């Protein structure tokens, strides 16, 4: 389902790009013409395993869970609340079947732009090319920081690094049920509850 893009959506779009580098209202207006707004109900699958990812997405409402199946166990790849972006990156770059599933944890609204439209924008405008380069730098940094965090076997250390180096941590904690945070940190819900309680006691 699609809907019209609102002025609030445009503010979120500008905030998303501004987190990487400065951007003018004129440039936002140019880019926004290529976006569509998609609506998903809680529990609805946005991308299923085997789909070819053709969109880059920014969440404007709700939370999206990105995961894979490993022998029927669910492995969380990422959690994306409002004001952050997501897609199945390997599928998007290679035009290969997605290994990920993207599911709406709540009612979700996303701004989406097709890969072919991004390709046309960067060919025609050097400012857009630079902007997307800076966005991709931030995406790579976010993924590298998560990889660093997951190297530690200590649940306590993983939670510490989650708060210290994962830029999206405040967004995640404000909008995501604990069991999904636990999965993101490669912990059981019981481990996460224990470490969260210990951290709160130290702070309080």
Image (cartoon, rainbow, N blue to C red):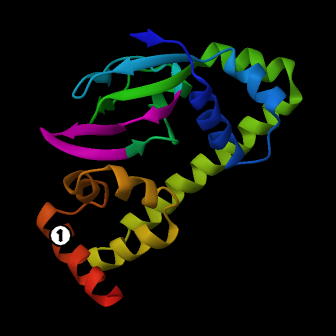
Residue 149 shown left or right of residue 32 in the figure: left
Main SS type for the magenta part?
A: strand
Q: Position of residue 202 (x, y in %)?
A: 31, 89
Instruction: Identify the residue shown where x is 44% and y is 54%.
Output: 171
Residue 104 within the segment the image draws in magenta:
no
Q: Position of residue 139 (x, y in %)?
A: 58, 47
How many residues crowd around disc 1 within 10 Å: few (fewer than 14), some, or many (20 or more)? Answer: some
Give the magenta-colored segment's residue range: 57-78
Query: Would you identify the image quadrant in which residue 154 lies?
Result: bottom left
Q: Position of residue 83 (x, y in %)?
A: 52, 41
Instruction: Identify the residue shown where x is 45% and y is 11%.
Output: 2
Q: Quadrant of the C terminus?
A: bottom left
184 shown above or below 41:
below
Query: Would you identify the image quadrant in which residue 49 lies?
Result: top left
Residue 115 shown left or right of residue 64 in the figure: right
Residue 102 shown left or right of residue 43 in the figure: right
Of helix, strand and loop, which one carries label 1? helix
Whether residue 90 appears in this view of the structure is yes
Q: Position of residue 31 (x, y in %)?
A: 72, 22
Q: Which residue is mark 1?
A: 193
Query: What number of labels is visible?
Result: 1
Whether residue 154 appears in this view of the structure is no
| Furthest residue in direction front, as rendered | 7
Q: Quadrant of the N terminus?
A: top left
Instruction: Identify the residue shown where x is 48% and y is 33%.
Output: 60
Query: Would you identify the image quadrant in which residue 97 lies?
Result: top left
171 shown above or below 6:
below
- Decide which of 93, 132 is in the foreground and name it: 132
Instruction: Identify the residue shown where x is 51% and y is 28%.
Output: 57
Residue 65 within the segment the image draws in magenta:
yes
């Amino acid at each position: 389902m699609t809907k019209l893009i609102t002025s609030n959506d445009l503010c979120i779009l500008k905030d998303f790009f501004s987190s990487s580098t400065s951007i003018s209202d004129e440039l936002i207006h140019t880019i926004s013409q290529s976006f569509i707004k998609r609506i998903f109900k809680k529990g609805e699958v946005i991308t299923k395993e085997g789909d070819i990812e053709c969109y880059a997405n920014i969440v404007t409402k709700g939370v999206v869970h990105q995961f894979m199946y490993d022998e029927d166990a669910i492995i969380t790849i990422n959690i994306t609340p409002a004001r952050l972006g997501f897609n199945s990156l390997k599928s998007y770059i290679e035009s290969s079947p997605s290994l990920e599933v993207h599911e709406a944890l709540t009612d979700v609204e996303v701004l989406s732009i097709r890969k072919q439209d991004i390709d046309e924008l960067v060919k025609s405008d050097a400012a857009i090319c630079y902007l997307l380069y800076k966005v991709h730098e931030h995406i790579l940094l976010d993924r590298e920081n998560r990889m660093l965090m997951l190297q530690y076997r200590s649940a306590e250390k993983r939670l510490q690094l989650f708060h210290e180096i994962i830029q999206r941590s405040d967004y995640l904690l404000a909008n995501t049920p604990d069991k999904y945070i636990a999965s993101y940190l490669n912990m059981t819900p019981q481990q996460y509850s224990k470490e969260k309680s210990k951290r709160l006691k130290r702070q309080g």
